[in-house]
Image: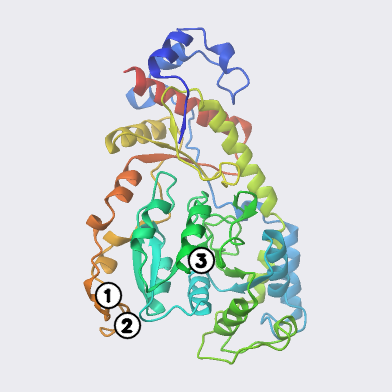
């Protein structure tokens, strides 16, 4: 956890009423004295807000739509072949190749969503009835649903202060039936993959990276989605790059690739995949149709070329804010397994209680800065349909094994996850924030934080 080096008393003694301006010069617009800052009346108490209108964030990808996406889309319209396998030159295929090259994997398959990408990956990994899959207790429904749709049993592990799966809470949950671990890289943060991969190797289980909320993130220099046995991504509107909907499955393993190709395309493989796989080694099996259409492929082909720009801007803005608040006494920023690889989506602080967190968020909002607790995911074990083990059919295999019958979900199964989420919150960043916007975020956080620590 990133903590400022000074304790509160040392800090206040150092800065005095007016002495801190020079100390802060150079940080994002925070060249003000701490003493003066601490005395400023908060907007929530009737003071002047830092901003008159609320500064929030917007979906990232569409802010970067331009003639590139337009041209790609027009070409699909003009071709009159929006189906990827008719008409010769596939945009979906171009997107797959570019995306695979970008993140450094041999194979990528475009699919209809992150959810169908997960289901496809589970099928590729031959996850089925009797198998168990370990998931973080806080992630999106799709991780759980894909396990259930595969007929397997979801087992939850607690998260830690990085908001990703706690590597120290995995091993005790492994049984002879465990087939895979799904570390989700959530809210732009990367899960600590090294210890997870070590556990997976020791117990011979797969690692499937869910990168839906961290497209473009890196762990120790490698792109997420290229490190585990398989990775998935989502290109729904709330993700780093987007076509409104869409997904991808990635792997370096030709057999897993072929199984994923067959599962997402009615059990078959077609050229050019047949050429890549030298004709294909496996037989077809009952499958689905999750093929990406050409309109989606066109937009994503444009978007993937902007992934670096979006991520670089997001990280730069995040750094400005972090540097502008780094000297605050006792500051606890969200833990990170790789601060340089983190996308920079959040500037989140961890508080000692939910009440303090909520007070901070309310005051920040009054200053004109949109602020919230962690979002975009759900504490799954306490969700009604999960706690009630409700499936589409009463005899669904997931809950008809002895382990499936015995397993109990509910809030009691993940107290640490709930506690951490309740105490965490802050600001969601945006790649198009100006310097001034970042300075306002810094000013507002400093103002509220110092008021809360000197009150
Ligand atoms: C972590 C995670 N996994 C999977 C998904 C599913 O993606 P989609 O909405 O494209 O089905 C999401 C969507 O928000 C997500 O956040």
Marks 1 and 2: in contact by CB < 8 Å?
yes
| Number of residues whose C-alpha sits closer than 10 Å to that of mark 2, classed few (under 14), some (14–19) or many (20 or more) | some
The answer to whether residue 47 of the structure is visible from this angle is: no
Residue 336 image offset from top left, x and y in percent: 50, 43
User: What's the distance in space between the residues labelled 2 and 1, CA to CA?
Assistant: 8 Å
Residue 122 image offset from top left, x and y in percent: 48, 75
Q: Earlier in the sequence, mark 3 or mark 2?
A: 3
| Number of residues whose C-alpha sits closer than 10 Å to that of mark 3, classed few (under 14), some (14–19) or many (20 or more) | many
Q: Secondary structure at mark 2?
A: helix
The answer to whether residue 406 of the structure is visible from this angle is: yes
Say left or right for 153 vs 430.
left
Task: Answer above or below: position of 41 versus 366.
Answer: above
| Residue hosting label 2 | 397
| Residue hosting label 1 | 404
User: Is the shortest distance between ligand 1 and the CB of mark 2 under 8 Å?
Assistant: no
User: What's the distance in space between the residues labelled 1 and 3, CA to CA?
Assistant: 22 Å
Residue in the foreground of this view, choosing between 275 and 170: 170
Task: Answer above or below: position of 442 versus 117.
Answer: above
Q: How many marks?
A: 3
User: What's the distance in space between the residues labelled 3 and 2, CA to CA?
Assistant: 22 Å
Q: Quadrant of the C terminus?
A: top left
Say left or right for 275 vs 179.
right
Q: Earlier in the sequence, mark 1 or mark 3?
A: 3
Q: Earlier in the sequence, mark 2 or mark 1?
A: 2
Marks 3 and 1: in contact by CB < 8 Å?
no
Q: Which mark is residue 208?
A: 3
């Amino acid at each position: 956890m990133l903590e400022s080096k000074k304790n509160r008393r040392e800090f206040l003694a150092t800065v005095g009423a007016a002495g801190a301006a020079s100390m802060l010069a150079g940080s994002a617009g925070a060249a003000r004295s701490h003493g003066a800052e601490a005395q400023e009346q908060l907007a929530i108490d009737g003071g002047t807000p830092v901003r008159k209108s609320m500064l929030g964030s917007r979906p990232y990808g569409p802010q970067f739509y331009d003639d590139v996406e337009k041209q790609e889309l027009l070409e699909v319209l003009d071709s009159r072949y929006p189906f990827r396998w008719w008409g010769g030159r596939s945009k979906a295929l171009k997107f797959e190749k570019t995306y695979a090259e970008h993140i450094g994997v041999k194979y990528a398959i475009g699919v209809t969503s992150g959810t169908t990408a997960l289901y496809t990956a589970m099928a590729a990994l031959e996850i089925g009835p009797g198998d168990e899959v370990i998931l973080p207790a806080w992630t999106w429904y799709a991780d759980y649903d894909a396990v259930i749709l595969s007929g397997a049993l979801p087992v939850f592990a607690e998260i830690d202060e990085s908001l990703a799966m706690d590597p120290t809470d995995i091993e005790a949950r492994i049984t002879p039936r465990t087939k895979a671990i799904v570390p989700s890289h959530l809210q732009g943060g990367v899960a600590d993959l090294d210890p997870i991969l070590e556990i997976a190797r020791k117990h011979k289980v797969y690692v499937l990276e869910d990168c839906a909320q961290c497209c473009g993130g890196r762990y120790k220099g490698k792109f997420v989605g290229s490190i585990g046995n398989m990775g998935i991504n989502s290109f729904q509107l709330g993700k780093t790059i987007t076509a409104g909907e869409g997904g991808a499955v990635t792997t370096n393993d030709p057999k897993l690739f072929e199984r994923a190709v067959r599962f997402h395309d009615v059990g078959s493989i077609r050229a050019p995949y047949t050429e890549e796989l030298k004709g294909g080694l496996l037989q077809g099996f009952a499958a689905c149709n999750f093929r990406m259409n050409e309109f989606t492929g066109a937009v994503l082909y444009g978007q993937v070329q902007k992934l670096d720009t979006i991520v670089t801007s997001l990280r730069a803005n995040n750094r400005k804010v972090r540097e502008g608040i780094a000297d605050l006494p006792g500051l606890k920023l969200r833990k990170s397994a790789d601060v340089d690889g983190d996308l920079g989506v959040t500037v989140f602080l961890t508080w000692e209680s939910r009440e303090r967190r909520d007070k901070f968020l309310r005051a920040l909002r009054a200053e004109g800065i949109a602020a919230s607790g962690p979002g975009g995911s759900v504490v799954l074990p306490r969700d009604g349909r999960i706690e009630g083990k409700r499936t589409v059919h009463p005899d669904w295999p997931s809950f008809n094994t002895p382990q499936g019958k015995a397993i109990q979900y509910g809030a009691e199964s993940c107290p640490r996850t709930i506690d951490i989420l309740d105490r965490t919150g802050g600001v969601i960043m945006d790649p198009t924030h100006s310097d001034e916007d970042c300075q306002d975020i810094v000013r507002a956080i400093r103002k509220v934080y110092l008021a809360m620590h000197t009150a």
